[in-house]
Image (cartoon, coloured by chain):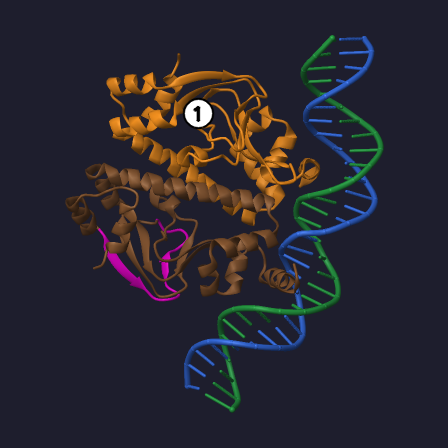
Chain colours: A orange, B brown, C green, D blue
Amino acid sequence: MNSQPLLTYINKIVTLTEEEEAYFSSILKHRKYLKGQYILQQGDVSNTNCFIISGCVKMFYADHLGQEHIIMFGVENWWASDLGSFISQTASDFNVQCIEDTELIQITYNDLQTAYSKIPKLERFFRKIIEKAYVASQKRIVRNFSLSAKERYIVFKASYPEIEQRIPQYMVASYLGITKEFLSKIKSQIAVGK
Amino acid sequence: MNSQPLLTYINKIVTLTEEEEAYFSSILKHRKYLKGQYILQQGDVSNTNCFIISGCVKMFYADHLGQEHIIMFGVENWWASDLGSFISQTASDFNVQCIEDTELIQITYNDLQTAYSKIPKLERFFRKIIEKAYVASQKRIVRNFSLSAKERYIVFKASYPEIEQRIPQYMVASYLGITKEFLSKIKSQIAVGK
DNA sequence: AAATGATGTTAATCTAGATTAACATTTACT
DNA sequence: AGTAAATGTTAATCTAGATTAACATCATTT
């Protein structure tokens, strides 16, 4: 039961005592999923907040035409939950599915609420995590507004070079909000000479 | 110095004691702006978190072509800050400008950090505020992905009927990410019979 | 009341990206 | 190794929404 990656991550932001670490570790659950398995399905309430130890997941939703839209990817040291559903304990609009075999640490909603009260530093930690997620989300809106598909692809490549290697191209297209055919066109344009 | 609207708002989420309210009130600053004035400008660090008592503001940015893109509107009982800049104390990508004469309550970054430590309930309050903002931001991304301009306009009208009355149509278009000409076309299509 | 600026409309033309469809390549399974 | 499934490419055609431009309406100031 290795919780170290998460504790290391937390201790970059707040400093937990040994007892606090021990208590917090005691409420964590470890879980392995195989490639293709769902961690969360559209319509379910997300009752655990998941931290990825290894592997890769995609968060996506299916629109009214059945089209998949990828909202985000998650790899090592990222969160793989629909925070919206987890926070408000309401049905999720999203699916979270493993793209690779994935190992993660889960914290249930109730355990986290208790932990907030026992360790106010955790409340600070999660406030900061959500602040960051919010800022990233705002930036994504801005990019989608003012950049062309080609520009968004270039930004994606620069921001997540490792992720692009690990996932099929049609998923990158979905994340960028374009078709796989058009991404293919963009790539060949870039390959020639912009 | 009327801080009641903000205190009422806070007490819907956490319960402050009288002393806590008194302390918190003591760090609030009131400020009035005239229509057209800027509360924040692109490139500045947002050093206050602003709660709107009355009036209306827009948050927007100018892209590399000088085009304005409106990210959000704020009215009574909303926040009117670039949370991203405020949180990370880095240069803002956005402007916040008054569309009407606006009265607001400001909390400085330093005062808020001190208040977090004195009153952990405030940390919880702001965690919940940001959680909500994050969820709204995610929903916005989803809508921009999967809805047509007409559908987004209909959702906007349904979600913020009061706001549409108070602002010029070209700002609605900017918020929706379309041109004013196209919004005009959409409205006449709807007026005829969809 | 005229004049100026801000806001809104209509129509013609243009373009980024979607759709369709046929084919190519890579990967995984027996 | 051989086949099926998954992934990627290319090209032709189509469309939502942008751009341009000319005009209409409304509000504010003198």
Question: In terms of depth relative to the viewer, which is nearer, A85 or A176?
Answer: A85
Locate residue B138 relative to residue A177 in the image: left or right: left
Q: Nearer the viewer, residue A82 or B96?
A: A82
**Which element carries disc 1, helix, strand or loop?**
strand
**Residue B177 appearing in the image:** no
Q: Is residue A124 left or right of residue A94?
A: left
Magenta highlight range? B28-45
Q: Which residue is mark 1?
A: A50
Q: Chain of mark 1?
A: A
Q: For the residue marked with disc 1, what is the amino acid?
A: Cys
Q: Is residue C12 left or right of residue B184?
A: right
Q: Quadrant of the C terminus of chain A?
A: top right
A142 sits left or right of B23 in the view = right
Q: Residue at x 37, y 60 (%)?
A: B38
Spot occupied by residue A122 in the image (x, y as percentages of width and height): 30, 29
- Depth check: give the residue in front, A89 or C29: A89
Tell me if mark 1 has few (under 14), some (14-19) or many (20+) residues whose alpha carbon lies within 10 angstroms of its own: many
Residue found at x 52% / y 64%: B169
User: Is residue A71 covered in magenta?
Assistant: no
Q: Residue furthest left?
A: B19
Q: Camera-side residue: A120 or B9?
A: B9
Residue A23 is situated, as x and y percent measured from the top left of the image, at 28, 18
Q: Is residue B26 above or below residue A86?
A: below
